[in-house]
Structures are given as structure tokens and as C-alpha cells.
């Protein structure tokens, strides 16, 4: 029996803000930011878009590709995010109601900085593999926060990716071959209760956190699977900016060609829990049967989940049944100025 | 000295002890009569004061007299000055002179705040200016007065990074060009990112004793003696200076050191100056008399201060490339001069160097310490 993805979907809000627009407000040097972080613009959630609505949109795309999975057969639904709309009250219940998956369903909201999305995928596929449920859903979604003027404000973006896992062979479009996690207590980024914005350890978030964790996770799963970088058609890493995923990929021995399909951050920004999962949906949009795909997330704190997927023939049948990821990124953008962005992101204090 | 860098896996006490043990081992002594610690702001960087007792304990020397000294980024130089006075006065025979700073445990904003306490808080800091801005103003005056150019400032970074490539202890081993410097992020006009020294964790240590004891311990290696020591203050706030085109504290400290040593600038074979920003190196080389006012910039551009030049300046890579753990820098500069005068500097050795000078500076020139060292006869 194999376990794999039977439906996948992504959602990207239409609104964008250009890096120059943010830099202008803070008197920052836009060209050096663009060069240093390899970021051009980022997505901005609209007034009616949050982690829940984006999860529903992504989930509807996943169901459309599932070849008729009955939502009532989904036995578990997990959403990984660090921007759940409620501090206390689950996001997953709203999403499950919206797609008609209640009430016989196990729901949990996950949080682990930027790896909460792959965390939900990790647990969902595990439950299917254990035979506990017929189908299980893992979602990564965020309307990420970055403090005004902080380096994070140039990257913190919005988006979602959803994956339905199942074990019925005729539906599996990408089989889960291997999983691996690498986790330590490395406090490089955090947000305490009642804080509006996260704090980070500046350069400490790089080498000892992102790079060490991602490298160990990717090397760990390749060792476990007996695979090398050249065996993969595509590899996706967490994308806190444009620079890090390409650097970590190259350090591990992947080529630009293997990395660029899932490399969305220069024009999307960092969608936190959605980041590497959305890179993966962009890869599935164009992957060929029998392609091996490496997905390695990173979450501050710090940990990384890695997956090896093998794409099946089924992908050719279902990929066109819902909107793909790249067109959502490259088309129909609405560009907003900083004032509109500040309003939409709740950065303006209103009268009480 | 230890390898400088972003030493996230080590604490202040650890890096300090590594440097101290290396110096004690190099000197062949296992006890000292006194230890001095130059450290600018352990309170703000790591939340720890009372360093002398903490570090004596760390070294297994609880009970030894110890003193932490502070003069902003000149704390290291002041540490040596204090140790020198101990030995010269006869209070102590052997002194462990150290400097340390652990700067990367806080983020950039907190590091900037901590460093900013070396400026005049009432007249400068509270109005929002930080050190790149203060040095940028000095650079602007120098450019207006003498026609100094951004390319000449960049030449300092190019030279010091070239030297740093040859120093295994340096934080940055990278080759930079004038174009790289000019294309790097503008921090405070005219200073680009690559005109600025980095934030660094590091420690350095020396063992000081009488020439007589040094000869007993020294074996075949040359004995390096402190021939001159000069210390001076200036107004912290730039607004109170008579002339922003010169560093008065550096000039006075250098004159005092030259006088004590009976030397003149042209006697120097190798020099380490406080290049916290590229403009600082140019102004320092003028203030210590290597070049006339206004000629420090062209001297760098003409290669006079390169490793093969007439008077090599910052063969270690300087603060620019070696890194600038503020309290440690003054001690690390002297460690480099000692290494050079011993003929142990490897690929960056200045051939035949027997007399050298180290200039350390606090804030935007509000204090300075200059030491002249020579091979003892």
C-alpha cells in the first residue's frame, strides 16, 4: 500500500506591494535590498483574506484535483500557520465547515514558525499510512507579520497551499516515499503572546538556524533514502527571501534548473507556513510522471521537515482541473501603495 | 588572540578564557600578579558587569587582582596602558592584559544602541545620530577641506581586506574592489557598508612583565618592549571640537608616546590604526604624523600603506577585515605588532620590522591610546 497526495491546490492573493514602495517609506536603499535579499515584490492579503479564507480557496483547488473525494471521507484536517485569526478558537473548524467535511473529523491547528505547513502534511500522511483515516488534509497558510520598517516587512507575504493525502492508488498523483525531520532548540525568531510582530536574531537566523537545519534535514532524508541531488527532478526549500533557498540548494549540490520551478519568493515574498508547500504546488503544476521531488521546509525555533515524493501518471490527468500556482503569481496583480498596504495589514490604529 | 567572528556557540567568558590561556601559554607563565580587562559594554551586550571577578574565576585564578577598564572602543588600549603602569610602577611584575567584547548576542538595533553610548548622549545620541553618521560628518569635512574622494576611502577597505586574506584570525576573508565598496549599501553618505567595520565577537590577550623576566622566559624569541605609551582625551561631542578635520586625541596620544619612546613617525616600520571606518584610518595616519594633514587619503591610494608600501598600515586586516570586537580591538592591534616584530606574521610579515605603533580610539575620537613597541636589545 502506498500513501500519497490525491489532491493539491494553492491560493495567492491578487494584491502586491513592490519593494521600492516599502523602501521609500523607510528611507531604505531599495537597490541594495533587492540585490541582498533578491526580493522584488510580495503578496498582500485583501481586507477579506486571512489564513482561513486562503485555506478554503486552496482546499477547493485541492478537491477539484482529487477526482471526486467526498469531503465527508476526510478524517483529519490540519492547518499550519503563525497567523491563525484567533488566538483561541481553531481555524480548522471553519475550513472544515466551509468544505463540508464536518462533523466526523479530527481537527488541529499547528504552529511552528514557517514549518507549520509541512508539519500538518507530515502528520496527515502519517495518519493515512497508519490506517486511522481514509483521507487527511495538510494545509500551510499565512498572512505573515513583519514589523513596520523591519527587514521582515520586505518579505512577509500571504498565501496558502493545501494537500489531501490518501492511499487509493488510482487517485495518488505524488507518492510519499520518505519523510525525515531535523529539530533542535535554536531560538532565532519568536513572537510572544500579545506581541504584534515577531522578533528575530538578525544574522543568527542564517547560518546557525536556517542553513544548519535545512542542510541537516535534506542530507538526512537523502541518506535515509539512498538518494543524491542528481536523482531529483526538483527540490524546494523554505523561502524566507530570494537568496537563502538558492544558496542552500547550491550548497547541497542542486542545480539552478532543479531549484527554480519552486522558487517563488522573489515575486511572492515569504508566505511563512505556505512558503515551501506553495513552491511544491508550483512544481506539481509542471512535474512529469516518475519525477522525484525533494521538499525541505524550515521553521524557526528551529526545525525542518523533509519529504521525498515520486510523481505518478495521475498528475497529467488532474493538474488542469484547478488554477495553477504560477498564473496566480504572474497575472491579475493589483498593486497597492504603502498607505493601502498599512491599512490592509492592520498597521493603522483606528479610533476606538 | 582567538579567531574573530560571529561566535554564536561561545559566551563572553569562554572567548576571553581562550585568548587568556593562549597568551599565558605563549609566554610560558601560569600565574600573574594582576589582570586587566578592556571591555566596553558587557552590560548592554550580554547583561553582565563585574567582569574582573567573573573572568578570574573562569581562568581558575580567583583572588588575583583584576580590573576592568573602559574607554569605549579604546578600552583595549587602555587595558594595556593600565597593565603597563602596573609593571612600570613596580606594583606588579607580571600582568595579564586582555580585551574582550561579545557583540552578536543582541540584534543590530541593540548593538547600535550599545555602541552609541560612546557618543555624547545629551548632545548627539538623543538626537538620533549613530556612529556611521558621526564618522560620515568627519568624512564630509575631510572631503571638503582636502578633496578626499569616495574612491580614496574605498582604497582603505580594499587594502585592509587584502591584508585580512592573509590573517587566519580575521573575521572576513574576502577580496573587495573599489567598485564593490562603492556599490555596497549607502549607510551614511559618504560611507558605504564596506567602509564600515563589522560587529564582532572576539578576545585578545598579552602577558606583560619586566624586560628582565621576559628575557628569562623568552628563549630564542625576540623580546618586545613597550617603548612609549600615550593616552589622551578630546571632547566626545563633535560640536565642541575646534576642527573636525583632525583627531586631536590621537595627535596628543601619539606625541606623548613618541616623546616617551624618543622616536618620531618616520622611525616606524609597521603600524596598526583604528580603522572603524575607512575615513578613520586616513585621519589616524595623519594624526600620528605618518602623513601631513590632507595627505592620508592619497597615501592609501598610492599604495604607501600597503603591505609592500613605505609604511605598512593595518597588516592584520585592521578592524575592517579582522573584525572589531570593540573592547578587544586595542589589545588585538598590539598582538599584531608583537607578532610582526617577532617575525612570526607569516604571509603578511613586514620584512625587517623592529619598531611598530598601535593606535586605538574611543568613540568618534573622544579618547585615544597609542603604544610604540620595539624589539628589546
Image: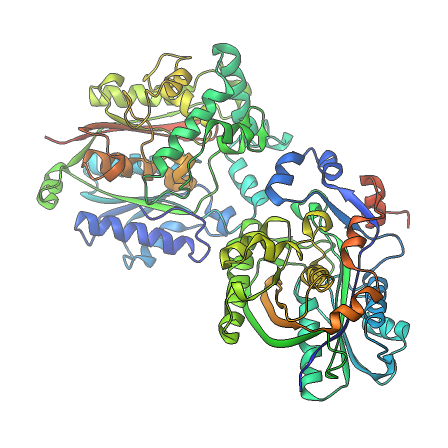
Q: Position of residue A101 (x, y in %)?
A: 87, 79
State the image quarter where residue A50 is shown.
bottom right
> Could you say where residue A336 lies in the image, as x and y percent from the top left?
83, 42
Residue that protrudes farthest toward the bottom in the picture: A131
Is A58 situated left or right of A237 in this image?
right
**Res B307 quadrant in image:** top left
Q: What residue is at 90 percent from the left and 77 percent from the top?
A: A100
Instruction: Give the quarter of the figure containing the N terminus of chain A.
Output: bottom right
In terms of depth relative to the viewer, which is nearer, A98 or A90?
A98
Q: Which residue is pictured at 38% across the width and 39% down the height?
A: B322
Q: How many marks?
A: 0
Q: Quadrant of residue B371?
A: top left
Give the camera-side residue of A249 and B98.
Answer: A249
Colouring scheme applied when the structure was drawn: rainbow
Q: Nearer the viewer, residue B237 or B141?
A: B141
Q: Is residue A351 above or below residue B348?
A: below
Left or right of B21 in this view: A321: right
- Front-most of residues B206 and A292: A292
Q: Is residue A138 visible?
A: no
Q: Position of residue A237 (x, y in %)?
A: 61, 60
Q: In the rendering, at what x and y percent does residue B94 appear?
A: 20, 44
Amino acid at each position: 500500500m502506498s500513501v500519497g497526495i490525491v489532491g493539491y491546490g494553492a491560493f495567492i492573493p491578487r494584491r502586491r506591494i513592490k519593494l521600492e514602495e516599502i523602501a521609500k517609506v523607510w528611507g531604505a536603499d531599495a537597490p541594495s535590498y533587492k540585490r541582498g535579499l533578491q526580493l522584488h515584490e510580495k503578496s498582500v492579503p485583501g481586507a477579506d483574506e486571512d489564513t482561513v479564507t486562503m485555506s478554503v480557496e486552496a482546499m477547493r483547488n485541492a478537491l477539484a484535483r482529487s477526482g471526486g473525494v467526498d469531503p465527508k471521507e476526510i478524517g483529519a484536517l490540519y492547518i499550519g500557520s503563525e497567523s491563525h485569526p484567533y488566538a483561541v478558537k481553531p481555524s480548522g473548524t471553519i475550513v472544515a465547515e466551509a468544505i463540508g467535511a464536518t462533523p466526523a473529523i479530527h481537527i488541529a491547528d499547528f504552529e511552528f514558525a514557517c514549518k507549520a505547513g509541512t508539519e500538518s502534511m507530515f502528520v496527515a500522511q502519517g495518519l493515512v499510512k497508519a490506517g486511522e483515516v481514509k483521507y487527511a488534509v495538510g494545509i500551510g497558510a499565512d498572512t505573515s507579520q513583519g514589523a513596520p520598517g523591519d527587514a521582515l516587512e520586505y518579505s512577509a507575504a500571504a498565501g496558502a497551499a493545501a494537500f489531501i493525502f490518501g492511499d487509493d492508488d488510482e487517485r495518488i498523483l505524488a507518492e510519499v516515499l520518505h519523510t525525515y525531520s531535523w529539530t533542535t532548540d535554536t531560538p532565532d525568531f519568536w513572537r510572544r503572546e500579545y506581541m504584534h510582530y515577531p522578533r528575530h536574531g538578525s544574522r543568527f537566523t542564517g547560518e546557525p538556524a536556517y542553513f544548519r537545519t535545512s542542510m541537516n534535514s535534506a542530507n538526512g532524508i537523502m541518506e535515509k533514502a539512498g538518494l543524491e541531488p542528481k536523482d531529483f527532478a526538483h527540490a524546494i526549500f523554505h523561502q524566507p527571501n530570494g537568496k537563502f533557498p538558492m544558496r542552500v540548494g547550491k550548497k547541497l549540490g542542486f542545480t539552478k534548473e532543479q531549484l527554480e520551478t519552486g522558487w517563488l519568493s522573489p515575486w511572492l515574498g515569504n508566505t511563512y507556513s505556505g512558503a515551501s508547500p506553495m513552491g511544491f504546488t508550483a512544481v506539481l503544476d509542471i512535474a512529469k510522471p516518475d519525477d522525484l521531488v525533494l521538499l525541505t521546509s524550515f521553521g524557526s525555533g528551529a526545525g525542518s521537515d523533509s519529504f521525498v515524493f515520486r510523481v505518478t501518471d495521475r498528475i497529467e490527468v488532474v493538474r488542469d482541473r484547478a488554477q495553477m500556482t504560477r498564473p496566480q503569481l504572474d497575472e491579475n496583480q493589483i498593486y497597492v501603495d504603502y498607505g493601502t498596504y498599512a491599512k490592509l495589514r492592520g498597521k493603522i490604529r483606528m479610533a476606538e | 588572540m582567538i579567531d574573530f567572528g560571529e561566535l554564536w556557540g561561545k559566551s563572553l567568558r569562554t572567548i576571553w578564557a581562550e585568548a587568556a590561556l593562549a597568551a599565558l601559554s605563549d609566554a610560558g607563565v601560569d600565574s600573574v600578579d594582576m589582570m586587566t580587562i578592556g571591555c566596553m559594554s558587557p552590560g548592554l551586550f550580554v547583561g553582565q558587569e563585574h567582569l574582573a571577578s567573573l573572568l578570574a574565576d573562569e581562568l581558575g585564578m580567583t583572588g588575583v587582582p583584576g580590573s576592568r577598564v573602559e574607554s569605549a572602543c579604546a578600552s583595549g588600549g587602555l587595558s594595556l596602558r593600565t597593565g603597563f603602569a602596573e609593571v612600570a610602577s613596580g606594583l606588579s611584575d607580571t600582568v595579564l592584559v586582555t580585551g574582550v567584547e561579545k557583540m552578536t548576542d543582541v540584534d543590530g538595533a541593540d548593538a547600535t544602541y550599545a555602541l552609541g553610548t560612546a557618543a555624547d548622549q545629551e548632545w548627539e545620541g538623543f538626537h538620533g545620530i549613530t556612529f556611521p553618521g558621526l564618522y560620515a560628518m568627519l568624512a564630509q569635512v575631510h572631503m571638503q577641506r582636502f578633496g578626499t574622494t569616495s574612491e580614496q576611502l574605498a582604497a582603505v577597505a580594499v587594502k585592509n581586506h587584502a591584508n585580512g586574506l592573509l590573517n587566519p584570525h580575521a573575521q572576513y576573508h574576502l577580496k573587495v574592489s573599489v567598485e564593490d565598496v562603492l556599490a555596497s549599501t549607502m549607510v551614511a553618505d559618504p560611507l558605504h557598508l564596506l567602509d564600515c567595520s563589522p560587529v564582532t565577537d572576539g578576545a585578545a590577550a598579552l602577558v606583560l612583565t619586566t624586560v628582565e623576566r621576559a628575557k628569562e622566559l623568552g628563549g630564542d624569541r625576540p623580546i618586545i618592549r613597550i617603548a612609549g605609551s600615550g593616552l589622551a582625551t578630546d571632547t566626545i561631542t563633535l560640536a565642541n571640537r575646534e576642527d573636525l578635520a583632525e583627531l586631536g586625541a590621537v595627535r596628543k596620544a601619539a606625541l606623548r608616546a613618541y616623546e616617551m619612546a624618543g622616536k618620531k613617525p618616520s622611525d616606524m616600520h609597521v603600524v596598526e590604526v583604528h580603522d572603524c571606518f575607512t575615513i578613520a584610518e586616513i585621519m589616524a595616519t595623519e594624526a600620528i604624523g605618518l602623513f601631513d594633514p590632507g595627505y592620508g587619503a592619497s597615501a592609501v591610494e598610492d599604495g604607501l600603506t600597503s603591505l609592500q608600501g613605505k609604511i605598512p598600515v593595518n597588516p592584520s586586516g585592521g578592524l575592517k577585515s579582522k573584525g572589531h570586537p570593540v573592547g578587544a580591538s586595542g589589545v588585538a592591534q598590539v598582538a599584531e605588532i608583537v607578532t610582526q616584530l617577532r617575525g612570526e606574521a607569516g604571509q603578511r610579515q613586514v620584512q625587517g620590522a623592529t619598531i611598530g605603533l598601535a593606535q586605538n580610539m574611543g568613540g568618534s575620537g573622544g579618547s585615544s591610546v597609542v603604544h610604540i613597541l620595539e624589539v628589546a636589545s
